[in-house]
Image: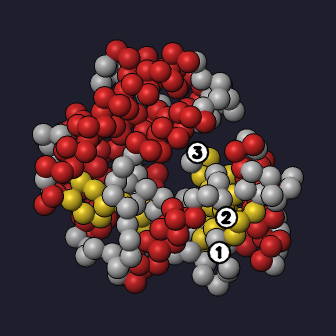
Amino acid sequence: MSSQQPSHLVPFTESTAASAVKSACGEIGVPSPRDLELLRIGENALFADPSQKLVYRVARSNTLTAKVAKELATARWLVRQGFPAIPPRDDLTQPVAVEGRLVTFWEYVPPGAHPAPELSDLAQLLRALHALPEPDFVVPPLNPFPLMRGRLERAEGVAEADLVFLEAACRNAEDDFHALVAADPAAYGLVHGDAHRGNLLRRGERVLLIDYEAVAMGPRAWDLLPTATAVDRFGLPPTEYAAFVDTYGMDVTKHPGYRTLRTVRELGMTTWLMQNVTHSAAEAAEFALRMESLRRGDLGARWHAL
């Protein structure tokens, strides 16, 4: 594959992302990965290489330079603040633009450390994150809509009726979302943007909050949504949610803007999943299930984490 080929002409798959990793390693003189393991693929692809103690993060397009720079700056700043974050490998030149992608390099933390991180750990980390001062670099305002619209514009293998519904749902939610953010500036601050248990890792005695792609300035309630909606959508026991609320000190389901924020969050979750419908029958089936519940306005329909 030519390194000059535009990324939008090349599908973003495990194999094309892995190719970008190998090219990036060659570009900066890092040994080629020997044990590349896909961790997840969505907006980015993440690969682990345990033998070299590296994690590679591949952004879909080399046009995302500002976003990738923010991820790196956020990680470095959090580490300087003493916050339990995962640092980039700054002994390596990064980011690397290859094959229409951007590749960054991060410290590898072996999985499976015990005890596994719990929701109480997430609540404690969010309390600490939300108490930090404003960063000394530019952090964009929380605005999920351009990202969702970009996904809809690039969508493949998705029924036209589904695209029309999602486009309309985004339009209908956007004004309410921005009005809600503007109405309560005291509740506005640094947010992780995708705060769920899957973004926790244990290293020794510390639990780390990872993945800074969605870090923004926005309503802190946004970071509490994934755990709150998990009760309805993913079968989280209410007792676990109650413990999360007790630890953090706020129940976001009582927030006056909860329904608006939840609608936007679930549109984001659904359009994220939509990107993989042509690559996985399971993800295509889950996308169809989510679309049906969104159309019905069914807040209690169970979804499945994939």
Q: CA distance from mark 1 to mark 3?
A: 21 Å
Asked whether residue 183 is in view, the answer is: yes
Way the structure is coloured = secondary structure
Kind of residue at disc 2:
Val
The residue tagged 3 is 42
Q: How many marks?
A: 3
The residue tagged 2 is 103
**Mark 2–mark 1 CB contact (< 8 Å):** yes
Q: Residue at x 24, y 54 (%)?
A: 219
Q: Position of residue 118 (x, y in %)?
A: 36, 55
Q: Nearer the viewer, residue 26 or 178?
A: 178
Q: Nearer the viewer, mark 1 or mark 3?
A: 1
The residue tagged 1 is 94
- Image: 132 above or below 60: below
Residue 233 lies in quadrant: top left
Secondary-structure class at tag 2: strand
Q: CA distance from mark 3 to mark 2?
A: 15 Å
- Image: 124 above or below 300: below
Kind of residue at disc 3:
Gly
Q: Residues within 10 Å of mark 2 (few under 14, many from 20)?
A: many
Q: Earlier in the sequence, mark 3 or mark 2?
A: 3
Q: Is residue 215 left or right of residue 2?
A: left
Asked whether residue 241 is in view, the answer is: no
